[in-house]
Amino acid sequence: MSTRLPFFPPDLFEESRRAAYEIVRKVGLSESQQFILGPAVARLEETIAQATGVRHVIACASGTGGLNLAVQALNIGPGDEVVVPAFCCQPVASSVANRGATPVFVDVDPWTMVIDPASVEAALGQRTVAIMPAHVFSVMADMPAMRQIAERHGVKVIEDAAVAQGAVLDGTAAGRWGDLGVFSFFQVKALGTIGEGGVVLTDDQELADRCRRQRNHGQTQRFVHTDIGQNCRMDEITAQFLLHRWPGLQQRLERRADIADYYTQRFTPLRDQGLLPPPSGRDGRCYYVYSVLTDQRDELRKHLAAQSIDTHVYYPLPLPQQPAFARFSAGRRFPNAESAGRRNLALPIWPHMTDNEVERVANAVVEFYI
């Protein structure tokens, strides 16, 4: 029996175990006893700002919290519409609906599974105030097209870059394309942390000020509340751990990209047999998840499981078909999103996989088709 190869590795932070203990001790015993929004949070914000070139970075409690802050900072509310992808993680819709606004679902590209620009433009109406493209799996959305659409129609762009930290498209970092952009630091993300965390990125001073107030109960100073805010603050332990992991980010991203290149090289010859790998290349790629498309998804998954290789299926039920969001879709169909939900299968791509493990996955997939 082969050793099990997990999809989410249980030893993700093994090399940082001792550092995590030391960070907890250092923060917990510090004289200042400042556990939230302290100097480590400020250093993290500055580090990310320098790396991306953005003017303002606002650290917050999670990627979802970042989307909530972005929607609130734009004063989106009842009567407003925001165009969102039908195939994606649910916060793109909940961040809008929780403000009393309407998420307008649109279909995705049948291959890349990211939001389709033509569908976005067709969905714009008099009540549209923003579009929220999301980068999915290993491919950034077509952000030049998103910006052009937004500028033509006078709407804002919230860039859900939760999975795409470190990705670059046409020389511009992910998170920089929108009026506001959001990263997530959930543990399995490229720069994951022990728990949750996120940031909002923007070049707009006013939007940055709103996000900073609203993440901290709407305060301009202690007990002075100018906004109806929320508690979406990042703690010092999270920030310290992210700073500890920061120097290895580019190496981990490069390793993910190398694994993806190898998978795609092995799988592209199988397209005629019904296996579709993601588009190759490095520009506009993030390789957070490597997901193939196949009509034999369930059979392939069973084949890999029999060889002790774990896989993962994302978003099998598109957002418009979820009970929580059915009222926003009015029975409309989204064929590409539905196809993606039926056909996607994500393979292990964590950066500390060995070459032998990567080859083992590729060999097992190829074996299924030949």
Image (cartoon, rainbow, N blue to C red):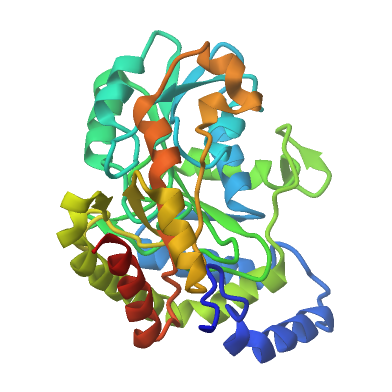
Quadrant in which residue 61 is drawn: bottom right
Quadrant of the frame with the C terminus: bottom left
The residue furthest top is: 126
- The picture places residue 151, in percent across and down from the top left corner, at 27, 26
User: Residue at left 69%, top 83%?
Assistant: 20
- The picture places residue 187, in percent across and down from the top left corner, at 60, 66
- The picture places residue 132, in percent across and down from the top left corner, at 43, 34
Quadrant of the frame with the N terminus: bottom right
Left or right position of 279 against 336: left
- The picture places residue 85, in percent across and down from the top left corner, at 42, 32
The residue furthest bottom is: 18
User: Residue at left 35%, top 71%?
Assistant: 364
Q: Is residue 217 visible?
A: yes
Quadrant in which residue 260 is drawn: bottom left
Number of marks in the rendered image: 0
Near-viewer residue (63 or 337): 337
User: Residue at left 47%, top 53%?
Assistant: 56
Left or right position of 138 against 182: left
User: Residue at left 45%, top 23%?
Assistant: 105
Near-viewer residue (153 or 358): 358
Determine whether 221 is above or below 109 in the image. Answer: below
Near-viewer residue (142 or 270): 270
Q: Is residue 161 visible?
A: no
Determine whether 138 is above or below 356 in the image. Answer: above
Quadrant in which residue 164 is drawn: bottom left
Left or right position of 105 against 119: right
